[in-house]
Amino acid sequence: MPNILTKRVSMIELFYDLVFAYMISQATSLIHHLQHGTISPVSFLIFAVIVIVFINSWMVQSVFTNRYGSSSWTDITFTLLI
């Protein structure tokens, strides 16, 4: 069996995950209030776009950091800018 490389999770990755979880909790407030028992299509569309954009951003950042990243100030700066 080949030697598997392990990489520790950095505090900046955990912070980015926490921000993503907070964003999901805030985005659900867009569809939390029902109007006549249904969600308005405009509210659902805005919710879907926001969630898709943030999930894609989070996935790209996570994959990049796990595959190519290191705990350098450059990586931390780009993580916070995204």
Image (spheres, grey):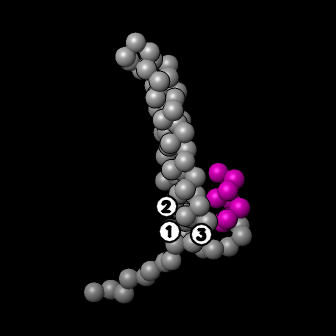
| Residue 45 appears in the figure | no
Q: Is residue 49 above or below residue 67?
A: above
Q: Which part of the image, by quadrant, shows the N terminus?
A: bottom left
Residue found at the far top of this picture: 36
Mark 3: few/some/many CA within 10 Å (<14, 14-19, 20+): few
Q: Position of residue 24 (x, y in %)?
A: 50, 43
Which residue is tagged 3?
A: 11
Secondary structure beneath label 3: helix
Q: Is residue 28 above or below residue 10?
A: above
Q: Residue at x 50, y 19 (%)?
A: 42
Give me the C-alpha separation between circle 2 and circle 3: 16 Å
Q: Residue at x 67, y 65 (%)?
A: 76
> Which kind of residue does numbered mark 3 sit on?
Met
Horizontally, residue 45 falls left or right of residue 79, namely left
Q: Is residue 21 above or below residue 53?
A: below
The magenta segment is 75-82
Horizontally, residue 60 falls left or right of residue 75, namely left
Q: Nearer the viewer, mark 2 or mark 3?
A: 3
Q: Position of residue 47 (x, y in %)?
A: 49, 31
- N-terminal-most mark, 2 or 3: 3
Q: Position of residue 59 (x, y in %)?
A: 49, 53
Q: Residue at x 54, y 39 (%)?
A: 26
- N-terminal-most mark, 1 or 3: 3
> Which kind of residue does numbered mark 2 sit on?
Val
Which residue is tagged 2?
A: 63
Inspect the magenta stretch and tell me whether residue 79 lies in it: yes
> Which kind of residue does numbered mark 1 sit on?
Arg
**Badges 2 and 1: C-beta atoms under 8 Å apart?**
yes
Inspect the magenta stretch and tell me whether residue 67 lies in it: no
Q: Is residue 81 above or below residue 24?
A: below
- The circle drawn on residue 67 is 1
